[in-house]
Amino acid sequence: MTAADERKHAVSTTQPLTGRTTDRPAGENLLEVRGLHKHFPLRQGIIFQRRVGAVRAVDGIDFSVGPGESLGLVGESGCGKSTTGRLITRLLEPTGGSVVFDGEDITHQPAARMARARRNLQMIFQDPYSSLNPRHTVGTIIETPMRLGGVNPPQGHKKRAQELLETVGLNPEHYNRYPDEFSGGQRQRIGVARALALRPKLIVADEPVSALDVSIQAQVVNLLQDLQREFGIAFVFIAHDLAVVRHFSERVAVMYLGKIVEVADRESLYTRPRHPYTHALLSAVPEADPDAMRRRERIRLAGDVPSPIDPPSGCRFRTRCWKARDRCAAEEPPLLRADGSAAGHLTACHFPEEPSVRARAEDIVLDPALAGPEGKS
Amino acid sequence: MFRYLVRRLLAAALIMLVITTITFFVFFALPSDPALLACGKTCSPSRLAEIKHSLGLDQGYLTQYWEFLKGLFAGRDFGDQSVRIHCGAPCLGVSFQTDTPVLTTLLSDFPADLSLGLGAAVAFLVLGVGLGTVAAVRRGRAADKAAVGLALFGVSVQIYFIGLLLLYLFVDKFQILPASGYTSITEDPAGWFKGLILPWTTLVIVYLAMYTRLSRSSMLEVFAEDYMRTARAKGLPAATVVLKHGLRAAITPIITIFGMDVGSLIGGSAVITESVFGINGIGKLAVDSVQNSDLPVILGTTLFAASFVVLANVVVDLVYGLVDPRVRLA
Amino acid sequence: MSVSTSPRPAGLAPAPAPFLDVRDLRVHFPTEDGLVSAVDGVSFTLEKGRTLGIVGESGSGKSVTSLALLGLHKGTRAQVSGEIWLEGRELVALPETEMRALRGRTVSMIFQDPLSALHPFFTVGSQIAEAYRVHHKVSKKEARDRAVEMLRRVGIPQPERRVRDYPHQFSGGMRQRAMIAMSLVCDPALLIADEPTTALDVTVQAQILDLIRDLREEFGSAVVIITHDLGVVSDVADDILVMYGGRRIEYGTSREVLTQPQHPYTWGLLQSMPHLTGDVGERLNPIPGTPPSPINRPDGCSFHPRCACKGWVPQGRCTVERPELRPVAGAAGHFTACHLTDAARQEIRGGTGLTEERGTGTTRAAR
C-alpha cells in the first residue's frame, strides 16, 4: 500500500456514492442483468389460495458478462445462484428487473420470440444422469436443439452431431448409443455437446462438475476451458466450489441470500476479499496442502444461512458477521467500490475488510460449540 | 387444524353436489320410463298420466331437480290426496317401487354393510401388513415366495368363485355355518358373527392379496432408506428396526388406500359378496334400483356411497397429518 | 499374516496391540454378473485419539469398508473375510447379537446425508434418547436429559426446545450436529464418519470438521473419516489411506502422503485439483479415463489403464502383476503399492514437474 493510499484510507472507509457502481464498462456487454428479482410465492389453502409470503430467491442483482468472458457465480445453497442461471436462460420467469442478451431485452420475451436468443444462449446442468432423456440416442439428444432452432448445417445434422461428439472428446461412432451406456463424466460431455450444437455465444453452466468424481472433474473443466478459448464462448459458471470457480472464471461474483455481496476479478477477490462473507468463505475451504492450511487464518461462522423467506433487515450477512453494528441492521449496504479496492472490485459492506492480507490474519470463531468452555479459538 | 377441517368439509359438500347433479341428469338420459314400469301390464294412457303426475315426472327436468334439492334440506310430501307420504329432511326422495322414503331403506340396510365392510377391512389390513412385512424381511426366501404366491392367488380368483366354493364347503358339505343372510347384532350377536364369517373370509382373500403386495413393496422401499441403516448402526434389535422404524414409515402410503377401501366397502361396493351370501345391503339395493329405473333409490345409493368415499378422504388426510410430522394441515 | 499385506512391522516382539487392527479385509457381493469384490484385502491400524482418513473415488470400496467395521454386512448376502480386531476382540466372526451390543456403543457412525439418515417421523430428541437407551438401563426422562446435554455440546442453540423438533425442522448443518450428537451419546471408542460434510456448505463443513476434531480430543475416541476430498483429510486426519479399486494404494501419515505422495494415482488426484492460490494460467492435469467398475477390474494394477507412468516399469509388469503395498525407502510408516522403483519415482518427480516428466515417461516407453 502506498502512502497516498493510506492517507485516503484514513479519511473515508467507503467510496462515495458517485463512484462507478457497475462491474464492467457498459455498452459492450453480451449479457446485462439489472435489478433482477425472483420471488417464489408461498401459498396456503386448498380451494382458495392466499399468498402468505415469498421465498426471495433472487432479490435484486446486477451484473454483466462481456463477449467470451467467464463470470463465476459462487455461494452456498439457497443463495440464489442456480435460480439466477435459470432466470438468465428464461427457464424461470423473472419477478422483476431486466435481462438484456446480445442487445435484445429477453426479460419477458414470449416463448415464440425467444428463438434467436435461445440459439445463442445455452445451458449445461448439474446432474448428468437426469438431464439426458434415457430413451433418446446421443445423436437425437445433440440434434434436437438444431432441429428446434431450425438450424440446418451444410454437412447435415448427423455429421454435425458426430463432429460435436469429437469436439467434446467422445467417439463419433457412439452416435447411436443411449445415455446409460456412458459414465457420469462422459454424460456431462454429451450435455456439453448438446449445448454447443447451435454455436452459442453464452453458456450458463450450473454446477457442471459437482456430481463428478474428483479425477473426472478436471477433465470436464479443461474441456470447458478449451471451448471457451477456441470458440470464444462466454460463460456464466455457477458453482459452490471456490477453487474450481477461481480456475475457470476471470471474474467472480459472490452471492448470499439472493444478493451479490462482492464481485471482482479473480486475483483481487481471492487475494484481497473485502466482504467479511467472502473472507469467511475462503478461509473455510479445506486445502490438500497441510502447510497452506496451517498458514491460513480460521474463521468459523455461527449457524447456517437464514431463511430466504424472511431475510435479515439491512445487510443480510449481519446475523453471522463479526463486524456487524447497528448501521448494518438499519441500512442495506450498496454494491460499491470500497476504498483501496482495485477497479471493478465492488463490495456490498458498510465495514469492509482491510485490503492488506496481513492486517486480517487472525482467527475468528463465532460458533459457540467450537469456542466453547475449553476456551479454544 | 379446525379451520382445515371446516374447509375440507365444505369442499366435500361441493363435491357431493356435483355428484348429485351428474347422477340426476344421467338418469334422464336413460331410455326406460319408470312410469311405464310402475303402470304394469294393464296400463291405460290416463293411468300412465296419473302415475307420471304422482311421481312428479310430468314436470320439467330442472323443476324436478330443484324439488329434489329442496327436499334435501326441507323435506317433501309425495302423492295426492288419497295417498300421502311425508319424507322428512334430508329427503332423498321416495322409492317409485315401494313408496318408502329412500333414506329409511338405506338406514335399514346400512348395518349389514357396516358390519361386512369394517370387519373385513380390519382383518385384511392386519393380515396384509403382517404378511407383507414378513415377506419383505424374508425377501427371496420361502416365506416371501409363499406370501407372493398367496397374493397372486387372491388377485386371480373371483368373488363369486371363492364365495360359492366357501358356501359349498362350509354350509352344504360340512354344515358348520348357517346358510345365508344377515342377522342384526342387537338381536343375535352369535348369529351375526356366524353369518358374517364366510363373507368376511371372501373379502379378506380378495383384498389381502393387494395389501400384502402393497406392504411388501412399501416395506422394501423403506428398508433401502438411510435411516434404517442408522437404526441398525445404533445397535437396535432387528425387531425394533423393522417394527418401529420400518413399519411406521411403510404404513403411510397404505393408509391412503385403506381409507378409500373402507369408505367404498361400507358404502355398498361389496355388491357381489352381498348377493352371493344373500345379504340385503346397499350394493344390492343399488343394483335392483337400476334395473327398476327407480330414480330416487339410484340417487340415494349413489350419494350415500359417494359420501363415504369423500368422508374417508377427509379422514385419511387427517390421519396423514398425525402420522407424518412433515405434513402440516393448514 | 504376511508381511506384504500389513503395514505393521512384522515379527517384532509382543508390542502392545493397536486399538483397531484391520487385517486383510475382503468384502464380496455375489451378483448376477459374478462376484463383485468391493473391498479386496485392506489392512490398517488406528490408535485412540487419532484420525484416519480413507480417501477414494466412487467404487473404491471406502464406504463398504466402513460398513464392515460396524458389522452391517451381517445378515446380508455380502461375504466378509479377514479380521477386524477392536480392543482385543475380533469382529468379523462375532455373532450378530454380540456385534449389536457394540454398535452405537463402542463403534458408532455418522452418515453422509443427515436428512435421509435421520428418521423423518420421530423427533430428534427421541432418536438420540433411543440410541442411549438401547445400551443403558435408564428411564425415558434420563435419556431425554442426556439427549439435551448432547445437543448442547454439539452447539445446537436452545437444546431443551429443539429436542422436541423433527429432523425436517432443522437446517442442514444443525441436522449433521444432531447426527453427531446421536453417534456420540454412548461415548464410543471408535467413530466412523462416512463423507460427513459432503452434503453441507463450505462454511458449515468447516464448523463440522472442527467439531469432530474437538470432540475427538474431548472424548479421546479414534476416528475414521471417509471422504473423496483430499482437503477434508488434510484438515482433520493424522493418517491417510488412499484406496483405488477396492485396494490400498498408498498409506502413511497425512503430511507424508500429501507432501511426498508416492503413487501415480495420488499424484494425479493432487494435480487434478484446482487451488485457491497459485497460478491460474496452468491447465488442470486430469487423470484420463474413469475409475474401474468393481465388477470388471483390470488385471495387474487396477490403475494401469489410467496411469501415465506405466512406461517407466519394464516389460508391462503393471498389466499383469498386482503390486503389493511396500514401505517407501527413507520414510518410516509410508507405504505404497506401485511397481515404480524409488529411483524412477525420484526421477519423475524430480524434474520441473510431473506434466513434462509424464511426457518423457511415455516417450521413453514408446522408445
Image (tube, rainbow, N blue to C red):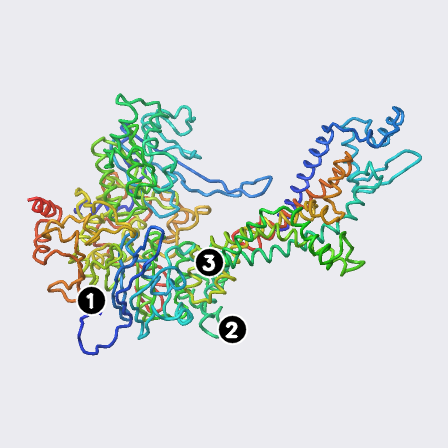
Tell me residue B123's x, y (percent). Answer: 63, 57
Q: Would you say the residues marked 1 and 2 are in contact, meaning their CB atoms lie under 8 Å apart?
A: no
Q: Identify the subunit bearing mark 1.
A: C
Tag shown at residue C325: none
In percent of width and height, residue A307 lies at 44, 49
Q: Nearer the viewer, residue A97 or C56?
A: C56
Q: Nearer the viewer, mark 1 or mark 2?
A: 1
Label whose residue precedes the other's in the sequence (1 or 2): 1
Q: Amino acid at mark 2?
A: Ser
x 28%, y 72%: residue:
C19
Lateral position of residue A236 relative to residue A4, left or right = right
**Residue C137 coordinates in the image, percent (x, y):** 48, 75
- Residue A96 position, x and y percent, is 43, 34
Nearer mark to the viewer, of 2 and 3: 3
Q: CA distance from mark 1 to mark 2?
A: 46 Å
Q: Tag 2, which chain?
A: C
Instruction: Name the residue type under label 1.
Output: Pro
Name which residue type carries label 3.
Arg
Residue at image coords 75%, 49%: B279
Q: CA distance from mark 3 to mark 1?
A: 42 Å
Tag 2's secondary structure? Answer: loop
Left or right of residue A177: residue C325? left
Kind of element beneath mark 1: loop
Quadrant containing the C terminus of chain A in the rendered view: bottom left
Mark number, residue B141: 3
* Residue A280 in sight: yes
* Disc 2: which residue: C139
Q: Nearer the viewer, mark 3 or mark 1?
A: 3
